Image: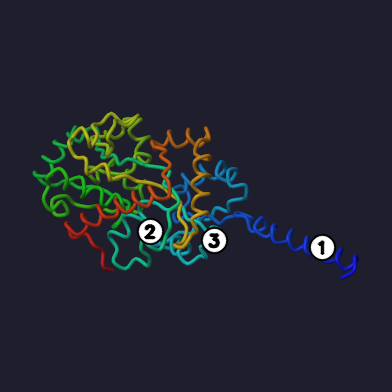
Amino acid sequence: MNLRSIAIAGVLGAGLSAGLLASPALAEYPERPINMIIPYGAGGATDISARAIAQPLGDAVGEPLIMSNVTGAGGATGSVAVQNAKPDGYTMLFARVGSHSVNPAMKATLPYTLDDFRFVTVYEINPVVCAVRPDSGIASMDDLVAKVKEGGVSYSSSGVGSLLHLAGAMVLSEFGVENPLDQATHIPQKGGGEAATAVLNGTATFICTNSSALKSFVANKQLTPILVTTKDRLVGFDAPTAAELGKPELEKLVGWTGIAGPAGLPDDVAQKWGEWMATATKDETFMKTMTANGSIVNVMSPADANTFINTQYETFRALVDKLGMRIEG
């Protein structure tokens, strides 16, 4: 081989090596915008949480986040869209307690299971608060249970199969009310706002719902909290905790928001989401928004998030089976 041939071979070899080294960089995740599916409508708890984290999360990711509300079937429509997406990290879901704890526990015909998703984090916890009207004559859980035994007690929810539906039954069951579905009348409404209004106007006796949904009503003294499902006292809610009342099982009864991808999401992608969320949730504006809504920011690792969600699911499923709340249709 002459010197010219050797030089050409050297250039080609160097170019090939450079190309091989450059390939991983070109495929570095993320290299394009990420679709973020919100499976509930605008203005709801999931949407508020997602929009609050969007800016700091987008800054941490370094690529635009395309926020889309894909609604229907109690969060199932948007969830299925992510379930069927390619597990490459470019289609992700803002998962919620309703779509990924309550629905799998209660609905026999749900088109997905928890195994169809990989959770990369849970970052927001909404304790459940039980509340009544100030003029109800009920000032404690003991008072409520006594009223239930007298008859005529009802509780409102955002719909059959919702967290609120399950929460009212679970709380009464934990406080010793046998067959709570028979002892207290469930009054489903079209949403969380209407469920709270039902208690305000006297249509329902009490409600157990996310702290964020009741914070303004409690602050304005329109509703009186009688229980929060936390271990420690919740700021803005002058009510005993589940721990104080000796009902630690109720600490599992919380709302939450997390992020998930399809099953098969690679480990390195899940790890990046964990890092991004740890950064994004330190944002001052985001923290103020969450605190104002009565939420607790608690960023879980992918492993901790999966454990938390599965524990919640098992708790709710056992209650559903015990009380016969399974929805077959």
Three-letter code, disc 1: Gly
Determine contact: label 2, label 1, CB under 8 Å: no
Q: Of tags 3 and 1, which is closer to the observer?
A: 1
Percent x, y of residue 302: 43, 50
Determine the secondary structure under disc 1. helix
Three-letter code, disc 2: Gly
Residue corresponding to mark 3: 88
- Pick the residue in front: 247 or 262: 262
Q: Is residue 253 above or below residue 37?
A: above
Residue corresponding to mark 1: 10
Determine the secondary structure under disc 2. helix
Residue corresponding to mark 2: 74
- Pick the residue in front: 21 or 103: 21
- At x 22%, y 44%, the residue is 249
Percent x, y of residue 59: 60, 43
Q: Quadrant of the C terminus?
A: bottom left
Determine the secondary structure under disc 3. loop
Q: Residues within 10 Å of mark 3 (few under 14, many from 20)?
A: some
- Which of marks 1 and 3 precedes in the sequence? 1
In the image, taking residue 159 as reference, residue 64 lies left or right, namely right
Three-letter code, disc 3: Asp
**Res. 91 visible in picture:** yes
In the image, taking residue 325 as reference, residue 122 lies left or right, namely right
